[in-house]
Amino acid sequence: MPRRKQLKSIAAGIADSFNSRNNAIEGYWAIGKLCRFAHEHTISLLTLDLLNIICTPQSAEFNAVMHDYKVKLRAIMNKQGIPEDQLKAATIEIDFHPEYKAHLHCFRSVLGSPYTVTTKLMTDLGKIYCVRTGGNCKPHDPLMESRRSV
């Protein structure tokens, strides 16, 4: 029988996948493009609502990546036998001005500024499973980056 507490490991998988260099938007690293968007709009926190496909602050640029992660989330839940009605909310928050945490940000290991990715999954009973990961990144610059073939 599937249990809601399995959502904690699902949240960890979604966070790690989203933070991965394999997470691309139009062939470029998604975190770099999100960082560029945050810098252009002078904000530090972006929230992606996976169930409703809403980016806060509003931007249609990231709808495709939100849809992809919504599909991934549903597929994982289905594979684990967790009914979709047990998930009330699913968000990914990206903070580009976080407090430094040694276990999330390897000091000077990668160029760029620290960021964190926080995945929150809320059950129909109100329990929130939260997983945080992070790294360092620079804002997306197509002149300096290679585009992955799509």
Image (cartoon, helix red, strand yellow):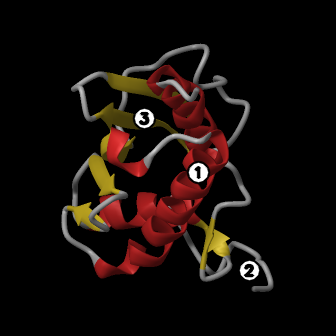
Is residue 14 in sight in this rendering? Answer: yes
Label 3 close to label 2 by CB (< 8 Å): no
Locate residue 88 relative to residue 66 in the image: left or right: left
Residue 97: percent from left, percent from top: 34, 36
Q: Of callouts 1 and 2, which one flags the residue occurring earlier in the amino acid sequence?
A: 1
Query: Which amino acid is tagged 3?
Result: Thr
Quarter of the image for residue 89 reads top left
| Mark 2, residue position | 147
In three-dimensional space, the C-alpha distance between marks 3 and 2, rounded to whole angstroms, equals 26 Å
Q: Where is residue 29 in the image (x, y as percent from the top left)?
A: 63, 65
The amino acid sitting under disc 2 is Arg
Circle 3: is it few (<14), some (14-19), or many (20+) Cα within 10 Å?
A: many
Q: Residue at x 46, y 71 (%)?
A: 67
Q: In this view, does 88 lie above or below 145?
A: above
Q: Badge 1 is on which residue?
A: 78
Which numbered tag is attached to residue 96? none
Amino acid beneath label 1: Asn
Q: Which of marks 3 and 2 is in front?
A: 3
Task: Give the label on residue 118, or none.
Answer: 3
